[in-house]
Image (cartoon, rainbow, N blue to C red):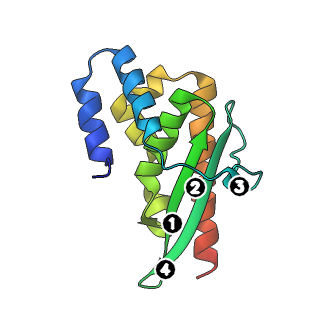
C-alpha cells in the first residue's frame, strides 16, 4: 500500500521529538521509486536547491484533463524525504488541482516550516514551483 499524505500527517503527530521526525523523513525518502540514471539530467534538475534534486514529470489525460505524476530523487537523505513528501502531495492530480494545492499549508501543519533550514525551505519552494510550472505547461497544451 502506498503512503498517503494523511498517513504522513498521522505519523508526524505520533512523533513528539524532532529527531524522530527527521528519521521518519529519511525513511520516507527510502520509499522513493528509483529514478533511472538517465533521468538525472539537466532537464529534470530543480534549480534553487542546495542539494541535487531531480523531478521527472509525466503527463497523461484523464477525461480530457492533464494528470501529472512525478518521480524524483536527491543526493541528500533528508531532502529525499522532502522530495517524497512533496511528490506524494502533488502526484496523480490534475493540473488544475495541482495549481490549487498549497504545500506551505502542509509544511506548517507538520511543523516543518519552523524546523527546516532556510536553504532547505528554498529548495522545497523551488520544487513546488517547478511542479506548478509543469502543471501550467500541461494546461497550455489542452
Mark 3 vs 4, N-terminal side: 3
Q: Residues within 10 Å of mark 4 (few under 14, many from 20)?
A: few
**What numbered label is drawn on residue 61?**
4
Q: Single out the mark in the foreground, 4 or 2.
A: 4
Cβ–Cβ under 8 Å for marks 2 and 1: yes
- Of badges 2 and 1, the one in the foreground is 1
In the image, what residue occupies the spot 37% across and 16% down? 18
Measure the alpha-carbon separation of dots 1 and 3.
Answer: 20 Å
Q: Position of residue 101 (x, y in %)?
A: 43, 54
Q: Identify the residue position indicated by label 3 in the image.
A: 38
Q: Are marks 3 and 4 in contact (CB under 8 Å)?
A: no
User: Mark 3 Cα within 10 Å, few/some/many (few <14, many 20+)?
Assistant: few
Q: Residue at x 40, y 22 (%)?
A: 23
Q: Mark on residue 102? A: none
Q: Quadrant of residue 109?
A: top left
Q: Pointer 1: what residue? A: 68
Amino acid at each position: 500500500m502506498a503512503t498517503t499524505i494523511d498517513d504522513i500527517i498521522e505519523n508526524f503527530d505520533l512523533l513528539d521529538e524532532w529527531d524522530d521526525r527527521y528519521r521518519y523523513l529519511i525513511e520516507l525518502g527510502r520509499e522513493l521509486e528509483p529514478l533511472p540514471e538517465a533521468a538525472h539530467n539537466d532537464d529534470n534538475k530543480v534549480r534553487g536547491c542546495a542539494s541535487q534534486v531531480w523531478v521527472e514529470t509525466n503527463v497523461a489525460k484523464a477525461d480530457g484533463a492533464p494528470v501529472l505524476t512525478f518521480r524524483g530523487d536527491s543526493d541528500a537523505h533528508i531532502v529525499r524525504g522532502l522530495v517524497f513528501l512533496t511528490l506524494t502531495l502533488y502526484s496523480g492530480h490534475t493540473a488544475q488541482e495541482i495549481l490549487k494545492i498549497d504545500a506551505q499549508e502542509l509544511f506548517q501543519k507538520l511543523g516543518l516550516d519552523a524546523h527546516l533550514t532556510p536553504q532547505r525551505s528554498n529548495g522545497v519552494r523551488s520544487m513546488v514551483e517547478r511542479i506548478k510550472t509543469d502543471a501550467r505547461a500541461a494546461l497550455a497544451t489542452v
